[in-house]
Image (spheres, grey):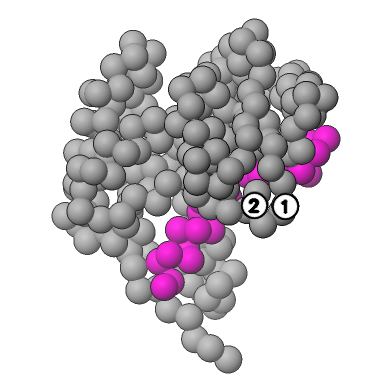
Amino acid sequence: MVTVNQTRLIGLLGGMSWESSALYYRLINQAAHARMGGHHNARSLMFTLDFDELNRLAAAGNWKQVAAVVSEAAHSLEKAGAAFAMLTAVTPHTVADQVAGAIGIPLLHIADPTGAAIRAAGLSRVGLLGTRYTMELGFFAERLQQRFGIEVIVPPEEQRTALHRIIIDELTLGVVRPESADVLLRLASDLGARGAQAVVVACTELPLLLDMDAYPMPAFDVVKLHAEAAVELALE
């Protein structure tokens, strides 16, 4: 049997929201246990940011300040010995390029393991579900298109607004409602009717609302894929 050891310390940029950070922590340690067995955990550091501050900045469109705040936190992880950093939320990847350019360690982008998984499944057209920022700003869809040749479609504006409200006003506060799960299923079905072969669940809170196997088509959990990729990188 080949012994697998962790050689790289994982740096987690958390607090966006704390619910998503807790989910990341669990998934990363589950993936580490699956790879290493025994009582192994993944060695990691987490810098917890204030979600209220970042949420207000994002709502005001002040992404420059968001990038500054997150980059400062990433610097702290780098100084503490993290071998690479990862954002434990999808929306802050709006400023991923700025953060990556501000630090001397790699930033593991959430879209890359997702794109690799979609390509491996032989799919080329997917629907994207997430916050309004994720669905509208293009940072996720464009990366899938440019790096993996995957076409991405999003719900219409009214549905994007409804999903964003569910995420921000309910899930980030730990509120899970069955009627909101019904809304999410309708959105996924509509995307399938428009030609999506699968849905990309690109929000750390959405798995709190609906399991991947509950969707009417293949569903890619970007959080789980991101966490598993982090463990693989840490074990290299």
> Badge 1: how crowded within 10 Å, few (<14), some, or many (20+)?
few
Dot 2 and dot 1 residues touching (CB under 8 Å) = yes
- Residue situated in front as seen by the camera: 212 or 220: 220
Q: Is residue 155 above or below residue 214?
A: above
Mark 2–mark 1 distance (CA, rounded to whole Å): 5 Å
Picture quadrant of residue 96: top left
Judge left or right: residue 34 versus residue 187: left
Task: Residue at 39%, 30% (x, y): give it.
Answer: 94
Q: Answer whether residue 8 is magenta in the image.
A: no
Q: Amino acid at mark 2?
A: Arg
| Camera sees residue 196 | yes
Residue 161 rendering spot, x and y as whole percentages: 59, 11
Q: Main secondary structure of the magenta part?
A: helix
Residue 223 shows in the view:
no
Write the start and end of the magenta stretch as one range.
Answer: 208-236
Name the residue nearer the viewer: 65 or 35: 65
| Element under disc 2 | helix
Q: Which residue is mark 2?
A: 119
Relative image position of residue 197 (x, y in whole percent): 76, 38
Rendered residue at 34%/50% (across/down): 107
Residue 157 in which image quadrant: top right
The type of residue carrying mark 1 is Gly
Mark 1 element type? loop
> Which residue corresponds to mark 1?
122
Residue 111 percent across, percent down from the top left: 50, 44
